[in-house]
Image (cartoon, rainbow, N blue to C red):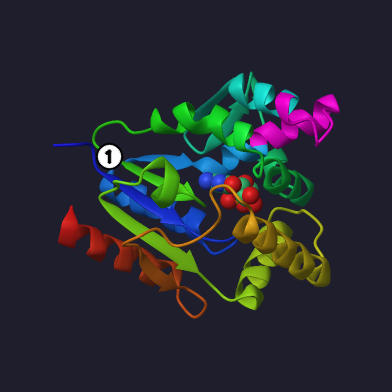
Amino acid sequence: HPIPVITIDGPTASGKGTVAHKVAEHLGFHLLDSGALYRLTALQALRRGTPLNDEHALAKLAEHLNISFTGDAIFLAHENVTDAIRQEEVGNTASKIAAFPTVRTALYGLQLGFRKTPGLVADGRDMGTVIFPHATLKVFLTASVAARAERRYKQLIGKGIPANMEDLLMDLKARDDRDTNRAIAPLVPAEGAHVLDTSEMTVETAVAQVLQWYAAVG
Ligand code: C5P
């Protein structure tokens, strides 16, 4: 039997991170937050002043990421960057560099390595389309732009990070646009994916739905 994989893809702030985390916890599975890998690469680039149009240099950064995950914390070398990578600037930069094919290729093997027994929940944009096309269960989470902006706003304020609703809406739309329209690994539901609109749904309901789908195939 292959090691089971549940992919959860969707746009920024659709709730996929939270849902993936809870589904993984419930099943005792490993978790891959693939967006964190693009964010870590972006953070490195911003800190080192790597030109954001230098695809080759960015791919090198991605290839040599010295990362580790401990519980819910993410480390770059020995520094805890869990909060640093959540900044809007880092997310926006991540979405720009994620459009480079060689950056994506550089992170490919790293992502496959997360598939370990007893199973994996992987969240991102292309988990079901590119990285794990033969996943046991594929889910595509969406929510309206308004619902997502509100969630992101609360998330940032809750972390003590200043936020402005109008800027957030603009950023979300720009990022959706980039992620959906890029030539490589664009954000689209994978073939056979279950689509779940969470605009009017609690996290608990979304998690229960994913678990129910998994129980039917896993
Ligand atoms: O999901 P998150 O907002 O952390 O991802 C940050 C950015 O990384 C996204 O806007 C997207 O451009 C990119 N990304 C990607 N493929 C993934 C995960 C994230 O291109 N599998």
Residue sitting nearer the eye, 103 or 112: 103
Instruction: Name the amino acid type tagged 1.
Output: Gly
Mark 1 — residue?
119
Q: Residue at x 51, y 30 (%)?
A: 69
Q: In which quarter of the view is residue 210 placed?
A: bottom left
Label 1 sits on a secondary structure element that is loop
Instruction: Please say if 37 is above or below 123.
Output: above
Extent of the magenta region: 40-56
Residue at x-position 29% and y-position 46%: 134
Residue at image x 57%, y 33%?
Answer: 74
The answer to which image quadrant residue 153 occupies is bottom right
Q: Is residue 63 above or below residue 107?
A: above
* CB at disc 1 and ligand 1 closer than 8 Å: no
In the shown orientation, is residue 5 left or right of residue 181? left
Q: x, y percentage for residue 76?
A: 64, 25
Residue situated in front as seen by the camera: 72 or 39: 39
Residue extending farthest to the left is 1
Residue 131 location in percent, x, y?
42, 41
Q: Is residue 50 left or right of residue 203?
A: right
Nearer the observer, 161 or 105: 105
The residue nearer to you, when weighing 168 against 136, is 136
Magenta stretch: dominant secondary structure: helix
Quadrant location of residue 65?
Answer: top right
Left or right of 35: which side holds 117? left
Relative horizontal placement of residue 71, taking residue 100 as reference (left or right): left
